[in-house]
Image (spheres, grey):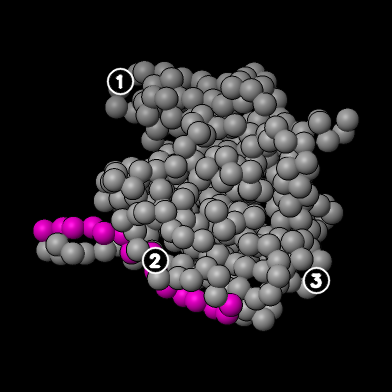
Amino acid sequence: MQFVKSRVQCDIDFDRPGRQAGFLRAPHSTNTSGWGTVQIPIYVLKNGAGPTLLLTGGVHGNEYEGQIAISRLAQSIKPEEISGRLILMPSVNTPAALNHNGSRMSPLDGRDLNRCFPGNPAGTFSDMLAHFIDSNILPHVDVAVDMHTGGHSAEFALCTVMHDIDDPELRRKTLAAAAAFGAPFNVIFSGVDEGATLTSAIERRKILCLGTEIGGWGRVSVEALRIGERGVRNLLCHLGMTAGTPETLQKDGAPGVRHMVVPTPACYSFAPSGGIFEPRHLAGDLVTKGQTAGWLHFVEDLDRAPTEILYETSGVLWAACGPGRVLRGDCVAVVMQAYEELKA
């Protein structure tokens, strides 16, 4: 396949058998480096016939478990162990990952890469990179997993995520892939701003796509990393790219994945003003409509009473607010419910 014209350079031959490790090189002119580039690591392993699986981590630089899981897989798996092709990008938004303590946004242009797809080859760094991934990498791909966590904004109940896909056969295959990945939950949802995400770009090409939300609060979770590393290996087995069968036994003894859904805007709770948010529950807890989600405290004001925030629906707490201090409009909780369609 010929590359679509882009300012990003890549010397990887996606059709060459064996293992390749290299970089995408995105031009970035600075005061001290007029011909400078941003180097974004990429691995391609190809052996025989089989599907192409794309694994991406670090689209947000402060989300760490996916970066570790994909990097470790890239350094350990050998081409002769697979049938098909693996494209591994452990740290897609490398400048954000290398920023002090990691950042969600790119420090080069202040953009959220996961709100820039399908991108623009003449745009800023984030636009340019999104365009290259969309136009020069995704056409190779049959299955994709974009690994995320809550970063510094939330902690999630460990899960894969997917959108509610119109195509019944693709929905069935995506649910089966999520079951094979083996996180405790798989969540079908439509976020607040999904149209410009990498997941949406993948789905526009009718490619089977999963995301993850494993961990958060700006640190590396032992259990989330275990689930992420096991999950990508499980998916390789599920796709017939490696030998073996997926292992989906959960830590609590459950035999597999619970499919969930975030069906309505009532599942989201937002801060009505700025303050310190005191949560009342942890991700994974059962909650009920009308129950206290938390309190907003205004310590800078004399004798100002805290504001109570209530859940507007019942279910399982999917996302629990990460930072203590929040701004007006910040999401402080998301509730998920059982995916009843599977029982029909």
| Residue type at numbered disc 3 | Gly
Give me the residue at 74% from left, 61% from top. 239
Marking on residue 10:
2
Please state the horizontal and vertical placement of residue 24, each as a whole percent of the image: 38, 64
Give me the residue at 72% from left, 46% from top. 174
User: What element does badge 1 sit on?
Assistant: loop
Marking on residue 244:
3
Please tell me which residue lies in front, 288 or 264: 264
Q: Mark 2 or mark 1: name the one nearer the start of the chain.
A: 2
Q: Nearer the viewer, mark 3 or mark 1?
A: 3
Above or below — where is 269 with respect to 216?
above
192 displayed left or right of 181: left
Within the magenta stretch, is there residue 20?
A: yes
Q: Which residue is mark 1?
A: 302
* Magenta region, residue range: 17-31
Please tell me which residue lies in front, 218 or 201: 201
What is the chief secondary structure element of the magenta stretch?
strand
Q: Nearer the viewer, mark 3 or mark 2?
A: 2
